[in-house]
Image (cartoon, helix red, strand yellow):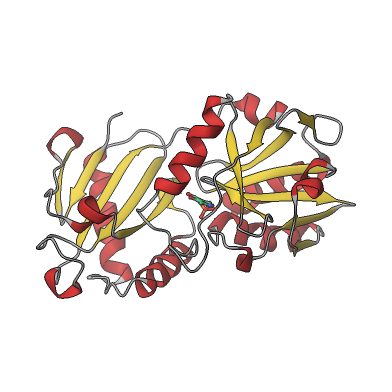
Amino acid sequence: MSATVNVNGRITPECEAVISVFDHGFLYGEGIYETMRTYDGRPFLFDRHMRRLRRSANMIELTLPFSDDELASQIRSTQTAAKLEGEAYIRVLVTRGVGELTYDLKATPKPSVVIIVKPQIDPAAEVYEKGVRVVVVDVVRNHPATVNPMIKSNNLMNSALAMQQALRSNAFEGVMRNYKGELTECTTANLFIVKNNVALTPPLDAGLLPGITREFVFDVGKDVGVEVVEQALRDDDLFRADEAFLTSTTRELVPIVTVNDRTIGNGRPGPVTGKLLNAFRRAVSAG
Ligand SMILES: Cc1ncc(COP(=O)(O)O)c(C=O)c1O
């Protein structure tokens, strides 16, 4: 890894980037984040990421100590220092900050802001050409009345355990169910299936992160005449889907061709997934 890191305005190479062990992000996992990537050097869908960061902040009663423009400028400075030749992966983290060992908000008046910039590594071409295998994992997605999945939280133990289960069976991703047994999303991506040419994705109230790429798929679907609809989904819907795919900022739309040991559709990336991926990429090129 060769990252450049901005910790509260101080930009350094990764080996010099430090944060106090008394930061409540470290002590309690109390913080929020965004992952963005650049196309042509510019963070893609920056305004939407800022909207989600502000919503996450509101949901944990954290006041962001910057305007959108100020954060954009800090990101630009970090990118400049990083001197990347290709596109950037950008992670913005905001934690409660440093304070006494107590959950009382009064102990942490100054949030910590960290920006990590490193090269964006795209998935191999094969991932898009052949599709991937995912598994449905036993770890249940957080109940919305616990750490609500709507919060893009630094507290990622649940997702880490779910992904570790998926990795043990060599899967590309793990699909999590909610406490009702409905499908929610993958550990770092949203989930779609295609049935009768309609793209279906679990509704937000199933308890999942409102992915920015997920949201954008609704827009590009309109552009190319593919209906995209929210619908509660269960294991059988996924197993019997014509196509399936996952979405995330760093991976765009990735076709899913196997779930556990069951083949989806004809076992190859499907036409509707391809149409949406092409439309997504056209929208990216159009800026
Ligand atoms: C749990 C979860 N769901 C979905 C996503 C995809 O969201 P986005 O499209 O905003 O990258 C992520 C991204 O990290 C995630 O962590």
Q: Position of residue 235 (x, y in %)?
A: 75, 47
Residue 39 seen in the figure: no
- Residue lying at 43% horizontally and 61% vertically, measured from the top left: 46
Q: Position of residue 92 (x, y in %)?
A: 32, 54
Residue 105 seen in the figure: yes
Is residue 14 shown above or below 180? above
The C terminus lies in which quarter of the figure?
bottom right
Left or right: 175 as drawn, with respect to 40: right
- Residue lying at 69% horizontally and 62% vertically, measured from the top left: 218
- Residue lying at 50% horizontally and 37% vertically, measured from the top left: 163
Q: Position of residue 271 (x, y in %)?
A: 82, 41
Q: How many marks?
A: 0
Is residue 268 shown above or below 67? above
Q: Position of residue 221 (x, y in %)?
A: 74, 58
The N terminus lies in which quarter of the figure?
top left
Which of the pair 126/142 is nearer the observer? 142
Left or right: 190 as drawn, with respect to 278: left
Which of the pair 192/134 is nearer the observer? 134
Left or right: 156 as drawn, with respect to 17: right
The image quadrant that residue 199 belongs to is: bottom right
Left or right: 84 as drawn, with respect to 185: left
